[in-house]
Amino acid sequence: MKNIKSGIFKQLKSPALKKSIPFHMPGHKRNISFAPYLKELSAKYDITEIQGYDNLQCPNGIILNAMKNAQQLWNTMHSFLLVNGSTCGILAAINTTCQPGDKIAIARNCHKSVYNAVELLNLKPVFIHPTVNNELHICGSIDPLELSMIINENNDIKAVVITSPTYDGVISDISAICTISHENNIPVIIDEAHGAHLAICEGFGLSAVKSKADIVIQSLHKTLPSLTQTAIAHICTKRINPDRFLNSLSVFQTSSPSYLLLSSIDCCIDFLIRNQEKINNKWINSIDYIDNEIASLKNLFAFYHGTSKNRLYDSIFSYDRSKLIISVKNTKINGKQLFDILYNDYNIVLEMYSDTYVIAMLSMCDKLSSIKRLIKALHRIDNMLDGITSHNREFTYSSSVLPEAVMRIRDAKNSKNKIINLEKSEGHISNEFVWAYPPGIPYLIPGEIITSDIIVQIKKAIDNEIDIKSDFDHKKDEISVIN
Ligand SMILES: Cc1ncc(COP(=O)(O)O)c(C=O)c1O
């Protein structure tokens, strides 16, 4: 082992990773004693489709059995194993429901894979804007009434795509969204990448699978004990032809699926079927324990946990308790500082930070010792923040600013471009995506006209050190526009 020189391998073997306490993805938290198969999966079982091992694109043996077990666990009509993450399931779902050039209604805060499908199929997106919670600085749920208005104004929409729960754990009223869409014979695709546990575990919010969305895509690796990249796509109604969906999947998945990943999915399903109730109770108890222990925080506060456990929040239909979001809004430190203190002083690695909060991802695989270390660290930091006056931070995303699209994404991206100063870009057509992380929502997409409002919002986000991502390697205060 000592003479392995690979930089990545060396980094994986570093004592820092071994010592660190994970409150981030993957959901198995490297806790190999929780689910024994996690320890077993290594190169000795690394094969792809050889004789006697079935075929992912045409399953009729061990893979089909695993699919049937998934159907039983999630109570679906059909379930498909994915080895390229939710990403390939989302691409396949849109490719199954839309023809090139069609119109599609998508939540503006959808994942990049949804935008990629729109670009690949040259679709015309109609955006559903998530509501905004200005107190928590996060995007809220999708308002079914807004979707209803959009469908009334656009009778040629071929599919609806919503993310629920979001990265921040916000769940939308998927039953109402399905009722409205289905009355108009429009299939609903739910990106439930962050919610594979919802339909299995009670007490975390309603899954889109139970609300009878047509296609629901889940990343097992995000919240369940399964290896990174493993995911699953469920068909829950007769509106979707499973053969067409499988066919679409074969476009976006590798033709050499890893049996480590397939087996991880299969073992995870089997493990959950056999231990569902026990795991659920234990997990809920550990979250209740966290809630009690952090209720006395004075300066930091947690959304939907601690003293806010039973609070109703404006614009948020429901919430997934497996996300522990700690706000620093009433303190003088920002999210990055809290994230760094936890990492540098306590070896605790969280999932992400924003200007005003950090996210710790909780999972059924969390060790009690890790949870206790997190609680202790939060109390110590909270005490250090005593007496410091609050900082009035602003949420820089506003859903009231809707840039007008004059070109489709694909056409705009393929047009000749030039890089200009953001200040001088008003009236130009954007040639690129400009994303704010968080809330993971694009300020601009290719083909939209840049307005003075958008320029102000992007500049404010830059000033607030929000992570702005764009498609080109230019300076922060520049933008690629159509020439
Ligand atoms: C909301 C959402 N949807 C989809 C994805 C893609 O999932 P995967 O990494 O399993 O491909 C992500 C990834 O982070 C995500 O946050």
Image (cartoon, rainbow, N blue to C red):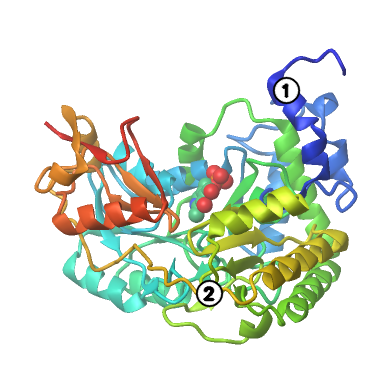
Query: Measuring 77% from the left and 27% from the top, which residue is drawn there?
Result: 52
Q: Is residue 51 above or below residue 336?
A: above
What kind of element bears circle 2?
Answer: loop
Query: Measuring 81% from the left and 61% from the top, which residue is drawn there?
Result: 373
Q: Position of residue 465 (x, y in %)?
A: 42, 51
Q: Which residue is mark 2?
A: 330
What kind of element bears circle 1?
Answer: loop
Q: Is residue 350 above or below residue 112?
A: below
Mark 1 residue type: Ile
Alpha carbon separation for disc pair 2 and 1: 58 Å
Q: Position of residue 183 (x, y in %)?
A: 33, 74
Seen from the viewer's position, the closer of residues 44 and 337 is 337
Q: Quadrant of residue 429?
A: top left
Q: Is residue 287 above or below residue 397?
A: below
Q: Which residue is mark 1?
A: 50
Seen from the viewer's position, the closer of residues 283 and 370 is 370
